[in-house]
Amino acid sequence: MSENKRFEKIYSQGVANVNEIWVDRETGVHYLYHAAGYSGGLTVLLDRDGRPVISPVVHREED
């Protein structure tokens, strides 16, 4: 089974209460993941105007 590299973790904070930011490498959309204990959730990261945070998509060669 090949490794899927569509998503890239660009930020991580915490151990018991974890906050992470993941970027979809195909669309550039950023996601916020939060986990506390046995629960967690994922949502689109929004800017101050309520729009999704999107980075320019950079196509990189697979490792």
Image: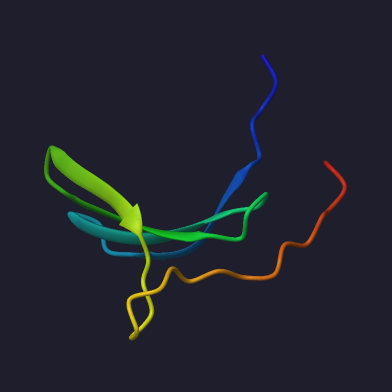
Please tell me in which quadrant of the rendered image residue 56 appears: bottom right
Residue in view at x 38 percent, y 79 percent? 47
Q: Is residue 56 above or below residue 34?
A: below
- Describe residue 22's horizontal placement relative to residue 49 as left or right: right
> 16 and 6: which one is in front?
6
Q: Is residue 55 above or below residue 19?
A: below
How many numbered circles does the render carry?
A: 0
Residue in view at x 63 percent, y 42 percent? 6
> In the orientation shown, which residue stands out farthest toward the right?
61
> 27 and 10: which one is in front?
27
> In the orientation shown, which residue stands out farthest toward the top?
1
Residue in view at x 30 percent, y 49 percent? 42
| Residue 16 point in image, percent of width and height | 17, 54
Give the quadrant of the N terminus. top right
| Residue 49 point in image, percent of width and height | 34, 84
Residue in view at x 53 percent, y 60 percent? 29
> In the orientation shown, which residue stands out farthest toward the bottom?
48
Please tell me in which quadrant of the rendered image residue 21 appears: bottom left
Give the quadrant of the C terminus. top right
| Residue 58 point in image, percent of width and height | 78, 62
> 30 and 50: which one is in front?
50
- Describe residue 53's horizontal placement relative to residue 34 as left or right: right
Judging from the image, the colouring scheme is rainbow
